[in-house]
Image (cartoon, helix red, strand yellow):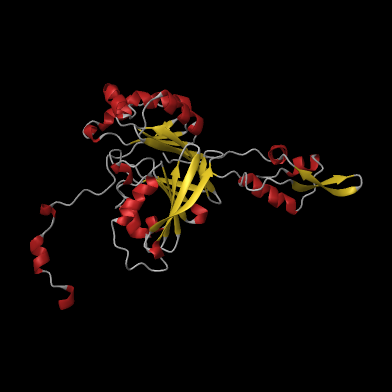
Amino acid sequence: MSIQLPFRHLEPTFFAGLLDDPVLLVRVRQLGSNLLFDCGQIHHLAKRVLTAVDAVFISHAHMDHWMGIDTLIRHLHATPKIVDLFGPPGITDKLEHHLAGYDWNLAEENWCRFRVHDVHPQEIISSIFSGPEGFLRQPLGRRARNDRVIFRNRLSQVAAETCDHRVPSLIFRIEERPQLRIDTQKLAEQNLVPGPWLKELKYRYSHPGTDTKPLLIQRSTPAGTEEFPLEDIAELCRQIGQPQDHPGIGYISDIGYTASNRRRISSLLKGVNLLLCECTFLRAAKEKARVSCHLCSDDVNQLLDKLRPTFFLPMHLSKTYNRRSRELYRELEPPPGTRMLELPLHITPAPLRAEMLDWQEFSESPCQDDQ
């Protein structure tokens, strides 16, 4: 049975197996750009995939979610672009240490820049590492968080909440940006006259908070067409806009099953179309899950009953279940209306062993220079 995901602009691909380090890549089709969520092992991703990454979102800096940052730097550093990186408090310091571990004496003017954002509950603190300057850190300042959205491009946006994993761990909601579609009949019922102001209205709808001054709208009156200042843009959008869905993807990786975490998950992710969620332990290891601040299968079942996603992909099962992975799918019980997707154990290539290589064949092959 084929899977029909309800996205017009987003194309999610999970580049990991059930036991591998989680790696979610979301392609924004019309923009030709990629959003990367976590980067533990990413050496198996093609270079063209990584060079198209415009933004990276790190849940937390444990090794299995962060160690691939060096692979990302390797492929992106000589690419003339700005790459945004979002993570919990301290992520900028950690990237600075990675970059400081290399010599950049051959830096060139067309190298990339990493714009890094520490996501705090109430604010975002940003810095930039400029390739042409040897990736020296420069502060960009801080901005208050007026909502949970931390990143926007023309067609998509990413919202985040901070959960607890004994360290701050971010969960994400990726969704297509709301686009205002005008109902012409409703427009006429309000005696509104189409004009350039509608373009400005659509822009403000999809870029909330960018412009707070009144919008001049045109309305038909007995005396002719007149302009009026509009303060409540949101209300007018409700009156003349066509109802529409905003498909979303939820990403939960490495959190404890605490009351505060559950509240944040429910608030951010209820009703997502596709949910990717860690399920590190089976129900028999619930106490181990509590101690290590992870989720077990029973915890995930309760979250699914609350969130009711259309599709659900369990991930990040502990490697201790290498030979017992089928038990996970038997213990997970999605509610009616939720379809569970299954992963192979591994997607990343197996490591090479010495016996896999035919050294005699290598030694007898003529060198390229001798041919």
- Residue at screen point 62% across, 44% down: 208
Q: Nearer the viewer, residue 83 or 42?
A: 83
Q: Quadrant of the N terminus?
A: top left
| Left or right side of 200 for 330 | left
Tell me residue 150's x, y (percent). 50, 44
Q: Residue at x 36, y 40 (%)?
A: 60
Residue 90: x and y in percent read 38, 43
Q: Specify the quadrant of the image occupied by residue 107.
A: bottom left
* Viewer can see residue 82: yes
Q: Please tell me which residue lies in front, 283 or 125.
A: 125
Could you tell me which residue is drawn at 47 percent across and 33 percent down?
310
Toward the right, the furthest residue is 223
Camera sees residue 308: no
Q: Quadrant of the C terminus?
A: bottom left
Q: Is 33 in front, or is 88?
A: 88
Q: Residue at x 30, y 23 (%)?
A: 286
Q: Position of residue 83 (x, y in %)?
A: 44, 55
Numbered circles on residues, count: 0
- In the displayed orientation, state which residue is furthest to the bottom: 370
Using the rendered view, name the quadrant where residue 52 is placed.
Answer: bottom left
Residue 200 lies, in percent from the top left, at: 69, 51
Q: Is 271 positioned to the left or the right of 292 in the image?
A: right
